Structures are given as C-alpha cells and as structure tokens.
Image: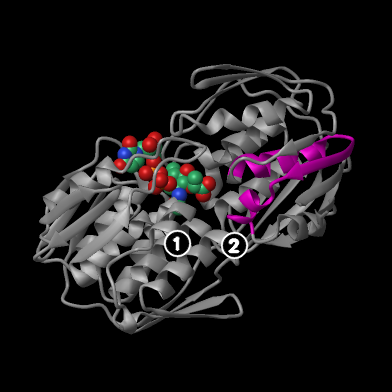
Amino acid sequence: MAYIEIVGGKQLSGEVNIQGSKNTVLPILAATLLINGVTKLNHCPRILDVEHMIEILIDIGCTVTWEGSSIIVDARGLSTDIVPTDLVKKMRSSIILMGALLGRTHSAVISYPGGCTIGARPINFHLEAFKQMNVVLEEEDGLIKCLTSGIKGADIYFPSPSVGATENVILAAVLGSGKTRIFNAAREPEILELCKFLISAGARIYGSGTGRIEIEGVAALHQTEYTAPSDRIVAGTYLAAAAGAGGDVVLRGIGCGSLYVVIQTLKRMGSRIKCKEDSISLHSDGTVRAVPEIITEPYPGFPTDMQSQIMSVLMKASGNSKIVEEIFEGRYQNVPEQARFGAQICLQDRVAHITGVPALKASEVSAGELRGGAALVIAGLMAEGKTIVNNPYHIQRGYEDICRDLRALGAQIEYKNE
Ligand code: EPZ
C-alpha cells in the first residue's frame, strides 16, 4: 500500500519551480472541444485530474498527446456528446464539459457528478443558466440530457459566485448567437486565464476577472497555443509548509499577485516574504503567530483551497486562531486527522477554533481529499519524528510530485510502497 513518509522537525531550505495550474488547465482542456482543430497547451501538470480529463477527451473522440509538459489536443475527431459516467465520477469537475459540448455539438449527456468529501457540490447554478440559454434539460437515471437548437445569449445572474458555473456559461456562450452577460461572475485568476485562452482562439469576451463578464458569440474559433500559469494553490501550500517548519525557501515561476491574501496572512503569522515578478521568497524562524480570524471567500478573498493548509500551520501558533469556512461545508472533514498531531481544534459548524500547542507530535494519518492531504504533509514537516500519510493518491490528484518538490526545499520526505 502506498504512503508518504516524512521525517519532520527540520527547517526547510531550497528552491523549487511551481507546476502548471490544475484549475486553469482543466477548464482549458474542456475548452479545446470548441476548436475544430489542434490546440497546444503548455506548462501542464502531470496530475491525476489532468490524466482523467485527457481520458475523457480521448473517450469522446479527440486525439490527445503529451509532449514534455505540453498537451496537444486534436478535437476534430469529436464523435459523441456522451461523457462516460465512470470518468465523471472519478473527477467531478468534468461537469464543465457540458458547456463546451453544448457549444460545439448542441448536445451533451453527462451524469450528475455528485458530492465529494468537501461538500455536496450542487450544480443548480449551471443548469439554471443553461435553461436560460435555450437548452432543454432532461434528467433520467442520474443522467442529465441537454439539447439545444442553438445557444442563445442571455443575462445570467448568479446568486453567489461559482467558478465552475461561470466557466460553463462562458464555454457554452462563445459559439452561441447573441450576447451573454454574466452578473456576479467568479473572479478567480483561473477564469481570467480561460478567457485569455478563448480570446487567443478568436472568442469575444469582455470583463473577465471582474464580477461582470460579457461574451459575444462568434461563428467559430481557430487553432491556438497557450501557456498555463503556475499553480497558485500549490505555491501557497509550499509557502505554508515553510512558514510552519521554518526556513528559507524560493518558489520560482510565480509572483504574489494571485496569492495576495495568503501572503498577507502568512506575514501576519510571522513569515517574512519577498515578491518578485516571477518568484516568491519566504523566511520563517519556525515560530508562528496566531491570527484572530480568517474567513474563506470567493476571490479575491482568502481561498478555501488554502484553508486546511493554513490550519495546519496555526496548530503550532502561540495563541488562539479562528477560521470560518464559508465555501465548502465539508472542508473540516480533515480536522480529526490533523488533531492526531496533538492539535487542539474545536469545531462549531463553519467555525474552527484553533488553540496553538508548543509542538506537534509525529503521527500516522490518512488523506481523505486533495487539500486536506496536503495539510497533513505540512503538519508532518512541522512535527519532530516520523509521520506517515496514507492514501497519497488524493494528493496526487493536484500535486505533480509533492515529495519531489518538498525535497527540493530540503524536506526529508518520500513516497513508499509496502
Ligand atoms: C472550483 O470548484 C475549484 N475546482 C475548487 O478547487 C475551488 O475550491 C472552488 O472552485 C472554489 O474556489 C476547480 O476549479 C476544478 P464553485 P467549483 O462552483 O467550481 C456553491 C481544488 O482543491 N455552488 O465556485 O466546484 C458550492 O456549493 C478544488 O482544486 C452552488 O450552490 O466551486 C460552493 O459552496 C476543490 N451551486 C460555492 O458555490 C452551483 O451550481 C463555490 O463553488 C455551483 C456552486
């Protein structure tokens, strides 16, 4: 059985290049279906979620190959609108294929992705939006069958920002007729990148990265090549690791812009951080200050995908901290595993009260989901002695090789299989 073995309690020191962004590459891979040609996407991470998305694209008729860290997608062979259920279950974010299939083939058949450890993950915003865009939806045996005589532009008002729903509407609208305006759109950097990619292929999109996005449908998109940015959550994870374990690290290939709130929070916790155009340096003496309150919010607020990692660091803070998880109701599922390190965390619904302890104790724990698993690795780096993290495949869904990267930063960590 595979696991990660960490010998913690040591300061980190070193430099690491940050992998391509998972949450940028996944929607852009879906967007390649809108191009009746070949797309080259550079700086892609070799992670399970990307492999699953490639498996789906091949299953529905595309030709997809890797060239180093580039992915080449030829979508001319797209032959079906049915997304294989077993693959949707493996990766719920494949739901964004709906918008792309509707845009290209005017139909899509996909199973309900269902919830996951971190929450129910409903898709009502997505479906309500499609109905307004001239899509007829039928639900039968857990499948959603979507059909349109042609996507029609509409005004879409989201009750609250949703990354996936914003992406799905953009993907459906770029080849539709008329203008689609999205109000209360998600403003994550990954939305901006998706729009930049689509614009490079000839789409007409205005306002991406703001809460109001306008898409003017065009007849067709043309071939393009695009380079994905580095993964801001992977970078944030490694910064948190160094903040908790102490040391001096440099992350290359990423600036502070998309991590502003995380950087500010780590500075409040006692780290010294220097931002350059294409690198972030962090110094920490390993002591951590408590933070009175951190609330997870849609971008540009504190990202929910960094909540578990910051919680691990705060477990050793001098004083009491509070985290309010406003995005995913299930994100505290990881807390019982974090508590095995001797942490004192009290949960009251969406609020976690963390009372810092002087030292964490090495432990054997199990990852239950992607970011929670990364948080357990961080705790293992902070705890004196040997920590075992089971079920590392959860972590491999989003981190190309967390052991390789943290070893580059001086950690004693490796994958083992027994
Ligand atoms: C994306 O998920 C990311 N995944 C998540 O990253 C990230 O945590 C999340 O955005 C928030 O930033 C990818 O980009 C592949 P949402 P998504 O729709 O699109 C509610 C990771 O670790 N909602 O923005 O599924 C929903 O319940 C992953 O890389 C509805 O109510 O998130 C949640 O409370 C985890 N109805 C909130 O909106 C809907 O139809 C935000 O969800 C859709 C969403």
Query: Is residue 328 at all visible to an observer of this figure?
Result: yes
Quadrant in which the C terminus is drawn: bottom right
Q: Please tell me which residue is depicted at 20% across the width and 65% down the height of the picture.
A: 107
What's under tag 2, amino acid-wise?
A: Ile
Q: Is residue 382 magenta?
A: yes
Can you say whether 258 is above or below 47 in the image? Answer: above
- Mark 2 Cα within 10 Å, few/some/many (few <14, many 20+)? some
**What type is the residue that disc 1 sits on?**
Leu
- The residue labelled by disc 1 is 26
Question: Where does residue 274 sit, x and y in percent of width and height?
Answer: 68, 49
- Circle 2: element type: loop
The picture quadrant where one finds residue 343 is top right
Q: Is residue 157 above or below residue 164?
A: above
Is 121 inside the magenta-drawn segment?
Answer: no
Name the residue nearer the viewer: 175 or 63: 63
Question: Mark 1 and mark 2: span between their CA atoms?
Answer: 11 Å
Q: Is mark 1 within 8 Å of ligand 1?
A: yes
Q: Is residue 279 left or right of residue 249?
A: left
Residue farthest front in this picture: 141
Q: Residue at x 23, y 71 (%)?
A: 104
- Horizontally, residue 159 falls left or right of residue 49, namely left
Q: Which residue is mark 2?
A: 47
- Residues in magenta? 371-399
The answer to which of marks 1 and 2 sits earlier in the sequence is 1
Q: Is residue 243 left or right of residue 384?
A: left
Q: How is the image coloured?
A: one colour
